[in-house]
RNA sequence: GGCGCGGUACCCAAGCGGCUAAGGGAGAGGUCUGCAAAACCUUUAUUCGUCGGUUCGAGUCCGACCCGCGCCUCCA
């Protein structure tokens, strides 16, 4: 049984989708006015973990992520550059999608854009006007919070608790109440304008999510995610709009992830203390290491991003990679499948149990490392049979459907397939490399292979100065060599970009 | 002011009423090794922000206090 913390109730609840076996998921996507930073990626990686675990658990998931391409900031940015909205937002959308791929985040089924759904927003606003939840004022249309008694249920705010904001549009538009929010904004000089049945203007901030979620997922759907900072006002307002218009419950489960901070300080574009994914990759980190770090702290806990933490994540992930490398190199051993199978089953169950408990990733990771800990001694004594090793590899492949942190081709600065980490092959000392597993996805080019063999020859000749020189040389080229009892293992590593 | 989150070893981080307080990183000693790396073995919290209380029993529940942080119409 899967349980999630529901912001609506403030409790961990048993998860049950509206339609058995099918989960309808809406996650708040980026406002495409700038390049995303790793704080944003923390949220998207969390959502990816959620989605992957649901799929792993047998659900079919329909996932919608919006792209907000019209709002105050995109308009301001486009204006400053003297280009249209479409032209202004395009590079940010492209960068976003590239990073999604780099971080191994499963694509959503739909990426609706606000500018492509003006009619759907207008339709909802029309209903809200008809039902009396919205009113017009000087060409703008506002939602009257006073008409919606459940307002504040998600954020646990009472209207009286709210301090009237000193920012935003409070001075620019006349509202009946300071807390009322704009559904539709009257035309302004220099802003894009849509001519619609409710008059000319452009949408307010929140209405797009109500319109696009209901279009693709229906009036009531299962899970809506976002960062904690979206709880109020964004999600609160979405609920008000959607439920006032539809008359039915908007979302059953609200899952919010906590912020990522940098060196203990909140990371925000407005503070300028943010890193983009590219900033980190350029320091020589593998995207999977970044993903591992973002993944490894429970989503409702604040994650303090430091390079020390990233180094720790890198080391932890390497431990897994080394373990898998050892398994792949197993040729024979005495510990048969029957001996290893119970360990595998225990690990699988523990992993699932952890994630079922509101995505308790720490428990799941601990289970994985416990398995490694119990198998490594057998492995180092050569007691694991080929078939048992394969069973363990199969388990990791299966679990990686959820974690997606195993090695795989990564992007280099030039955008080409550059390297693989943690993959190994063996060859006999002082002779030619005699083993090249056919399933090995990443072969050495022959020139490098020759140099490895040359080093093996030098070692056999006790010319250790030469052997060490070659090893050092290869390392500088991203090939790490490890001598084992009767072979040499190589690993491609990611080097910092210059 | 209102609402909310967190303080567990050198660092990260589970556990939330009951076996000797998971797991990862880092450090120290050892095994293996030409060396290095990896791996393995040993080791690192009589104690869970502080002080009281409840209980046969408390990081775990209650109260107060001390720190750090978030939200209260830009924000993932």
Image: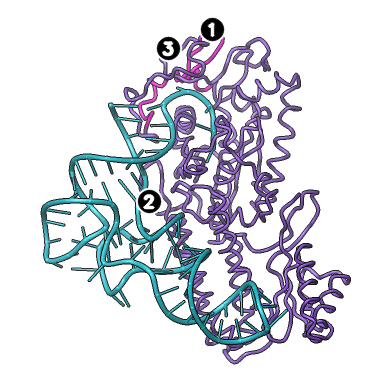
Q: Are marks 3 and 1 on the same chain?
A: yes
Which residue occupies the foreground of this view, B24 or A97? B24
Q: Which chain is purple?
A: A
Chain ID at mark 2: A
The 10 Å Cα crowd at callout 3, few under 14, some 14 to 19, many 20 or more, is some
**Is A13 situated above or below A383?**
above
- Residue on which the image places disc 2: A12
- Label 2 and label 3: CA atoms lie apart by 38 Å
Please give the range of residues in magenta.
A126-152
- Residue on which the image places disc 3: A176
Mark toward the start of the polypeptide (3 vs 1): 1
Location of the N terminus of chain A by quadrant is: bottom left
Does the stretch in magenta take in A137? Answer: yes
Going 82% across and 70% down the picture, which residue do you hit? A444
The 10 Å Cα crowd at callout 1, few under 14, some 14 to 19, many 20 or more, is few
Which residue occupies the foreground of this view, A364 or B45? B45
């Amino acid at each position: 049984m899967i349980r999630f913390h529901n912001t609506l109730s403030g409790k961990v609840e048993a998860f049950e989708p509206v339609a058995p076996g099918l989960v309808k998921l809406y996650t708040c996507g980026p406002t495409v006015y700038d390049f995303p930073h790793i704080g944003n990626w923390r949220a998207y990686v969390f959502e990816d973990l959620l989605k992957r675990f649901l799929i792993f658990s047998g659900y079919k998931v329909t996932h919608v992520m919006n792209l907000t391409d019209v709002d105050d900031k995109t308009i301001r940015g486009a204006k400053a550059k003297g280009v249209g909205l479409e032209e202004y937002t395009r590079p940010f959308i492209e960068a976003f999608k590239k990073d999604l791929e780099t971080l191994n985040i499963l694509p959503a089924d739909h990426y609706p854009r606000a500018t492509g759904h003006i009619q759907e927003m207008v339709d909802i606003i029309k209903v809200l006007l008809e039902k009396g939840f919205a009113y017009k004022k000087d060409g703008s249309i506002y939602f009257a919070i006073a008409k919606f008694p459940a307002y504040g249920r998600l954020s646990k705010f009472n209207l009286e608790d709210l301090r009237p904001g000193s920012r935003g549009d409070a001075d620019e538009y006349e509202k009946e109440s300071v807390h009322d929010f704009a559904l539709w904004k009257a035309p302004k000089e220099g802003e894009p304008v849509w001519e619609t049945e409710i008059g000319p203007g452009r949408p307010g901030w929140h209405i797009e999510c109500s319109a696009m979620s209901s279009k693709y997922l229906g009036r009531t759907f299962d899970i809506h995610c976002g960062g904690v900072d979206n709880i109020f006002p964004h999600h609160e307002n979405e609920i008000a709009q959607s439920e006032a218009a539809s008359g039915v419950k908007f979302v059953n489960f609200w899952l919010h992830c906590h912020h990522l901070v940098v060196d203990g300080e909140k990371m925000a574009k407005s503070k300028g203390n943010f890193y983009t994914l590219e900033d980190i990759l350029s320091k020589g980190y593998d995207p999977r290491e970044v993903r591992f770090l973002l993944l490894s702290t429970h989503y409702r806990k604040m994650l303090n991003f430091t390079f020390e933490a990233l180094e720790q994540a890198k080391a932890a992930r390497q431990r897994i990679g080394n373990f898998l490398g050892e398994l792949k190199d197993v040729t024979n051993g005495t510990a048969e499948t029957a001996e290893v199978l119970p360990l595998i089953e225990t690990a699988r169950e523990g992993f699932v149990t952890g994630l079922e408990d509101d995505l308790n990733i720490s428990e799941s990771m601990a289970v994985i490392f416990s398995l490694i800990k119990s198998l490594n001694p057998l492995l180092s004594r050569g007691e694991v049979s080929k078939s048992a090793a394969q069973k363990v590899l199969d388990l990791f492949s299966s679990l990686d459907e959820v974690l997606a942190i195993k090695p795989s081709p990564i992007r280099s600065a030039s955008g080409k397939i550059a390297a693989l980490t943690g993959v190994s092959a063996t060859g006999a000392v002082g002779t030619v490399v005699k083993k090249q597993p056919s399933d090995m996805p990443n072969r050495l080019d022959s020139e490098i292979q020759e140099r490895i063999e040359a080093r093996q020859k030098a070692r056999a000749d006790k010319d250790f100065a030469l052997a060490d020189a070659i090893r050092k040389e290869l390392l500088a080229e991203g090939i790490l060599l490890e001598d084992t009892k009767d072979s040499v293992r190589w690993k491609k590593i990611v080097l910092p970009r210059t």
